[in-house]
Image (tube, grey):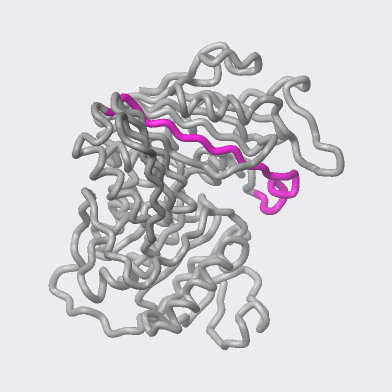
Amino acid sequence: MTTISQQGGARRADGPRTAPAGDSAHTGPRTAPAAPANTTAPALPLPVVLAGARGHGRWHLDNIRRLQDKGLVRLVGVCELTPLTEEELGGRHVEQSADFGALLDSTGAAVAVICTPIPTHTDLALTAARKGVHLLLEKPPAPSYAEFRRMADGVAAAGVVCQIGFQSLGSHAVPAVRKLITEGALGRVTGIGGAGAWARDEAYYRRAPWAGKRRLNGVDVVDGVLTNPLAHIVATALALAGSTRGEDVTGIRTELLRANDIESDDTSCVRVTTTGGRITVAATLCAEHPGEPYVLVHGTGGRITFWYKQDRVLVQRSGRGPEEIEYGRTDLLENLVEHLSGGDELLVPPESTGAFMKVVEAIRQAPDPIALPPDAWEQLPGERRRVVRGIDGFVAAAADTLALYSELGASWALPKEVSTA
């Protein structure tokens, strides 16, 4: 019997906007295997089970309903420790159980959407794979590189299709920016920066037993700012660099800090050296003035800013006026269905997240985050959230200069980086 061992679905993740009608299909340098060989295209709508339907899982529940109205999927089961109410289900009746494997069997599911606590991802994914059920697995796919490989290898051996839930990689801006880079629109690319300045209050870290933890009951969780809430910055930067596989990463340096009373990091930066160049990402959940996260491509002849949640791109090139473009987006569950039924390219297969998982592993292996001194942060009056003084400027400067916090002269930063090959 396979059950969800922790309260699922409380994890926040960036949700996509549906691509407008008429948008072209997402194309780009990434490749993925076609639907499993020796099978016929499944009949639509595909029966879907959702594991983890609260918290961010509510977004998946709404998205499944949207695709159900389009005739692509049919919600047949919800796996939660506490069953959803009739109101939460929107008055629709579906089978519910805390036993994921049994639910897949009884419903005849063809696809499972897994939005449960990070440490449960691998076992639940492999349970589905052994039953021939295809997957949309929320990010991060696993809390360690070993668990990621166990999941990815097991899924591949089972012959099922797995999509990893980095919704930003469904943006049509990703292949468009990659094309500009490869065509030399920016000249020689000198590096890629990423910036995320968000705010989370104390309740965010009390919403689930695993929230803000590096480990729980001896099991890796690694719920830090760069590995979970702002993981999309890292994954998107790696995609724009064309360095998405594990073997593309040649070095990683981290600076992990925290202002909140948690185990994990809430204010961090990382430098990733890849075969496609250097990437520096800085992020915080203690922003003074929270804003939209972005990725910044630097070149000898210009720069491109990509606000990935908005699918918005600003191109600035020497000798030309600035150009701002807003792109459409392909929903990842819809892409999975179209991949299975029509052979469309799968946008985010596990292997395309190997480089991201190398970053997760470096953060997992790094020393525990350093607590910022009391004079570096304050609790806002009337709000139960902590703010790091000056952090918004440091985050932006890191993306702009590709420097780490300590290199920018932050008085509270680590005296030196922690290096991981």
Quadrant where the C terminus is found in the figure: top left
Give the residue at the far right of this rendering: 382
Q: Is residue 192 magenta?
A: yes
- Compared to 341, does 129 lie above or below? above
Q: Residue at x 23, y 52 (%)?
A: 28
Question: Is residue 178 visible to the viewer in this orientation of the structure?
Answer: yes
Which residue is at the front of the view, 296 or 210? 296
- Compared to 34, does 377 lie above or below? above
Task: Identify the magenta region.
Answer: 189-209
- Compared to 70, does 29 lie above or below? above
Q: Residue at x 44, y 71 (%)?
A: 101
Question: In the picture, residue 181 is in which quadrant?
Answer: top left
- Compared to 378, does 162 lie above or below? below
**Percent position (x, y) of residue 311?**
43, 53
- Taking 388 as reference, is 234 left or right? left
Which residue is at the front of the view, 318 or 1? 318
Q: Is residue 302 magenta?
A: no
**Percent position (x, y) of residue 272?**
38, 28
Give the residue at the far left of this rendering: 38
Q: Residue at x 77, y 20 (%)?
A: 375
**Percent position (x, y) of residue 91?**
62, 87
